Amino acid sequence: MIDDLYSARILTLAANLPHAGRLADPQGTGERVAKLCGSRATVDVNLDADGRVVAFAQDVKACALGQAAAGVVGEAVLGASMAEVQAAREAMLAMLKSGGEGPTGRFEGLRALKQVADYPARHASTMVAIEATLEAIAKAEAARHPVAGAA
């Protein structure tokens, strides 16, 4: 039932949102909105010379599931590379849509949301934080390495 979806672990993650707020001068900002429910995540990042996240802030207005996912992302993202966040995103999508086990490594905590797979209407809200984080990292990378000749 839906009560099983909102387990104590999910509610604890939702209540603890690490790095809440915005960065004063981010290198990259990403935003995602789940159209069905209006869950929204705005993420700011700064990267080090190796492209790893050294500063992170998130402004999340989402349901408990979106907040829980954002809580896990916030706990795990410092020190992460774009490749790690991309791998976590892909594993999360596979977990929600095709029975995958979910992310491993630093983002393994997202597996707490495995039961969301049974509720397709909740998938998008569960993904807003990691999608916004990936967009923010991509924008920060693009700002650090502008394409020659681009205006």
Image (cartoon, rainbow, N blue to C red):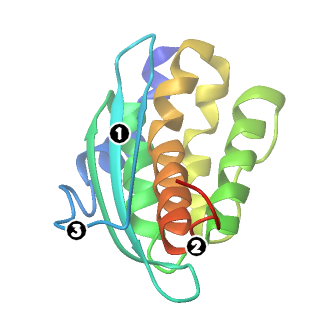
Does dot 1 land on a helix, a strand or a loop?
A: strand
Residue 37 position within the rendered picture, expressed as x and y whole percent measured from the top left: 38, 13
- At which x and y percent is residue 106? 59, 71
- Tell me the crowding category of disc 3: few under 14, some 14 to 19, or many 20 or more residues within 10 angstroms, Cα based: few
- Which residue bears the numbered disc 2? 145
Q: Amino acid at mark 3?
A: Asp
Residue assigned mark 3: 25
Residue under label 1, please give it.
41
Nearer to us: label 2 or label 3? 2
Task: Tell me the crowding category of disc 1: few under 14, some 14 to 19, or many 20 or more residues within 10 angstroms, Cα based.
Answer: many
Separation of marks 1 and 3 at Cα, in angstroms: 18 Å
- Residue 38 lies, in percent from the top left, at 34, 18
Q: Pointer 1 and pointer 2: residues touching (CB < 8 Å)? A: no
In depth, the one of 130 and 47 nearer the eye is 47
| SS assignment at label 2 | loop
Nearer to us in this view, 14 or 128: 128
Looking at the image, which residue is at 50% across and 81% down? 79
The amino acid at mark 2 is His
